[in-house]
Amino acid sequence: MAGQIYQRLALLGFSIPVFWLALLLTLFFSLTLGWLPVSGRFDLLYTVKTVSGFAIIDAWLSDSIWRHEMIMSALRHMVLPVLTLAVAPTTEVIRLMRISTI
């Protein structure tokens, strides 16, 4: 019973277009619940000089006393894109693991 549920969720996750999943996740986690930011690399409170082009490294290399808050802001802004891009490969791994154990 649980195996069939996992299989169907994996198929659903693999079938959803990535751009549509991104819109749904943004709508739910950002606009409905308010847990995550909608867009950007940092909150508008911080000005970070671009050194490497990677938000976490740029925040770490800054001379601001708010360095740790800037790193947390960059991590919060990365959650939705990382989650969106990780869904399709994760569902494929779930499907392959299920096939290999049967």
Image: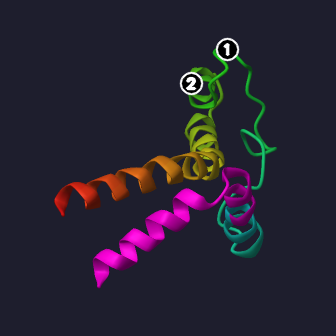
Tell which residue pokes out farthest to the left in this image.
101
Image quarter hosting the N terminus: bottom left
Q: Is residue 23 magenta?
A: yes
Other residues around mark 1 within 10 Å, as few (<14) / some (14–19) / many (≥20): few
* Residue at the spot 77% in from the left edge and 55% down from the top edge: 38
Q: CA distance from mark 1 to mark 2?
A: 8 Å
Mark seen at residue 43 = none
**Coordinates of residue 95 in the picture (x, y in percent):** 36, 58
Q: Is residue 16 magenta?
A: yes
* Residue at the spot 46% in from the left edge and 70% down from the top edge: 9
Total numbered circles:
2
Occupied quadrant, residue 52: top right
**Coordinates of residue 78 in the picture (x, y in percent):** 61, 44
* Residue at the spot 64% in from the left edge and 30% down from the top edge: 55
User: Considering only vertical position in the picture, is 80 above or below 8?
Assistant: above
Helix, strand or loop at label 1? It is loop
**Is disc 1 in contact with disc 2, using a CB cutoff of under 8 Å?**
yes
Tell which residue pokes out farthest to the bottom in this image.
1
| Residue 55 or residue 101, whichever sits in front | 101
Q: Amino acid at mark 2?
A: Ile
Other residues around mark 2 within 10 Å, as few (<14) / some (14–19) / many (≥20): some
Position of residue 32 in the picture relative to residue 10 (left or right): right
Mark seen at residue 51 = 1
Q: Which residues are magenta?
A: 1-24
| Residue 99 or residue 40, whichever sits in front | 99
Q: Which residue is mark 2?
A: 57
Position of residue 86 in the picture relative to residue 20 (left or right): left
**Coordinates of residue 28 in the picture (x, y in percent):** 70, 71
